[in-house]
Every structure is written in C-alpha cells, then in structure tokens.
C-alpha cells in the first residue's frame, strides 16, 4: 500500500472514531506498527491528527471565519504589512499571489508600482490591480489564473489552476497562511488553498509570507511550506511579545516587522 493511500486511510479512521490505536491501524492496513508510527508522525507534522501514547486522536481545529469577518480582522495591521512587503518588490519582477484578505491589501499597494507581472488565483487581487492599471496606466501585467470558482466567489482553485501555475517561473510567491509556526511551517485549513500555495512556492525563487501576529505560533490542518522553505515573514508589531516570533528567528527565518 502506497504511503498516500495509508495516510488517507488513517485520516478516515481517526476522523470516524475520534481516536485509534497503533495496533488497530496496523491490523486494518496490514502493515507493521513501525510503519504506522512513522505515518502518524508525518500526519501530526501536517496537522492532521495528534499522537498520544499507543495511537492518535483527532485535532480540533476551527475553520477560517467567513470572508466578510476576515476583511475586518486586523485591517490596520494588514495595511501596514502590505506597505512593508512593498519594499521587497522591484520593477520588472514576476509575482505569484494567492487569495486572502491580506494579499488583497497587498494588491492595493502593488498598484502604486509599475512594470510588474502579477499572476494570481484571487479575483479581488486581479480586479484591484486591473483598476490601478486603468487609473494610472501603470503598465503592470495582471494574469488571473483559470480554474473552478470557489463558493465564496473570491478565487479559483483546482487542477486547472495548479497546471497553469506550473507554466510560470516567478521571482516571488507572496502568500498569506492561516497559521504559521517554526515547527510546522505554513498551514491552511482548506486543502484546495494549500495546493495552490504549494504550487506557487514551487514555481518561485523566493517565498514571502504575510502573517499578522494572530497567526503566529498556530497550526491549521494542511501544511504547504516547511519553515526552511520560507525566505521572509512579514508580520506586525503585535508579534514582538510572542515567543513564536523568537522561534521563527531561531529557525533562521528572516522576519520583517511592520
């Protein structure tokens, strides 16, 4: 049985029964207990479960709030972070940007620059940069990726989106995770969001994450970037009192405080 199939079966068992023993998983999957222990370790790293003595239990993780709620949350911090992230961008660069309220704030700032190529799955980011082009003839090229429109109407996802991202080579991927910590890296709640973010990281020379202090030291369900794969974290001054910020720096992650 392939590792991916084992992981899917283990997730199903844990979600169905809330807790499972290593012995039960080994018996149901017809593999050794040592294989199960390795799989549980990998799945815990991804935030899919929590290991306990003799097995694993479910992880209670709250989904992201609705878009309208997220737009109001830490709005001032997001604006300051966007302005700080702008300093990392140079004319002529190609950027990959994912969907989110923080990257929507970034798009407003990017609209003040010229000569960029911005590739995004976010409808809000594309519309914002398109409007900036029309108002000041900035000469930025804006590419809205194809794909299936998500139920909230804010972005596109799916195999088509992933395939299109793979066609590009970008200078930077500028992304906003649901959660970020030094041990588990960048995580999001929805698998389809992570697939897009993971593809953008792979297609970019540099990965920049915009994460306000409320996201640091936390983990969500699915990981898309290890801490070693993240070049710069842009956060706000509220992070300065957090041990999670010291952990990021100890992991040799460059941190930019807005």
Image (cartoon, rainbow, N blue to C red):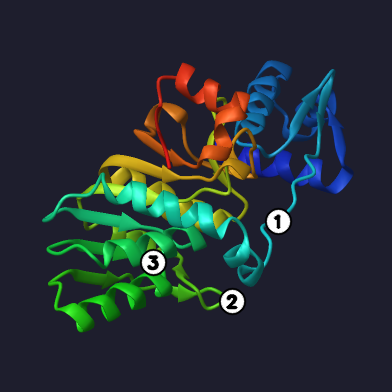
User: Which residue is the site of mark 1?
Assistant: 63
Residue at figure coordinates x 59%, y 76% from the top left: 151
Nearest the viewer among 29 and 179 is 179
Pointers 3 and 1 in contact (C-beta within 8 Å): no
Q: Is residue 164 visible?
A: no
Residue at figure coordinates x 84%, y 19% from the top left: 54
The quadrant in which the C terminus is found is top left
Location of residue 135 by image quarter: bottom left
The quadrant in which the N terminus is found is top right
Q: Indicate the secondary structure of the residue bearing disc 2.
A: loop
Q: Where residue 248 sits: x, y (%)?
A: 49, 25
The answer for how far apart the CA atoms under marks 2 and 3 are is 14 Å
35 to 150, vertically: above or below = above
Task: Say the numbered circle drawn on residue 151.
Answer: 2
The answer for how far apart the CA atoms under marks 2 and 1 are is 15 Å
Q: Is residue 16 visible?
A: yes
173 to 14, vertically: above or below = below
N-terminal-most mark, 2 or 1? 1
User: Which residue is the site of mark 3?
Assistant: 121
């Amino acid at each position: 049985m392939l590792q991916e199939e084992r992981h899917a079966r283990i997730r199903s068992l844990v979600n169905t029964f809330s807790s499972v023993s290593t012995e039960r998983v080994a018996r149901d999957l017809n593999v050794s207990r040592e294989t199960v222990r390795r799989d549980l370790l990998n799945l815990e790293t991804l935030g899919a479960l929590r290991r306990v003595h003799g097995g694993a239990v479910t992880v209670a993780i709250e989904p992201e709030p609705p878009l309208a709620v997220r737009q109001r949350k830490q709005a001032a911090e997001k604006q300051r972070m966007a302005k700080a992230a702008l300093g990392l961008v140079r004319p002529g660069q190609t950027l990959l940007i994912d969907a989110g309220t923080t990257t929507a704030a970034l798009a407003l700032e990017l609209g003040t620059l010229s000569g960029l190529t911005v590739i995004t799955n976010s409808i809000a980011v594309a519309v914002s940069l398109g409007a900036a082009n029309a108002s000041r003839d900035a000469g930025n090229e804006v590419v809205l990726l194809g794909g299936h429109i998500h139920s909230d109407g804010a972005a596109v996802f799916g195999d088509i989106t992933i395939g299109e991202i793979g066609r590009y080579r970008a200078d930077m991927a500028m992304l906003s995770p649901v959660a970020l910590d030094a041990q588990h890296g960048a995580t999001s709640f929805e698998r389809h969001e992570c697939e897009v973010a993971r593809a953008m990281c792979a297609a970019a020379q540099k990965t920049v994450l915009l994460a306000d202090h409320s996201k640091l030291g936390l983990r969500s369900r699915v990981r898309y970037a290890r801490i070693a794969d993240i070049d710069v974290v842009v956060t706000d001054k509220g992070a300065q009192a957090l041990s999670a910020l010291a952990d990021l720096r100890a992991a040799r992650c460059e941190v930019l405080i807005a």
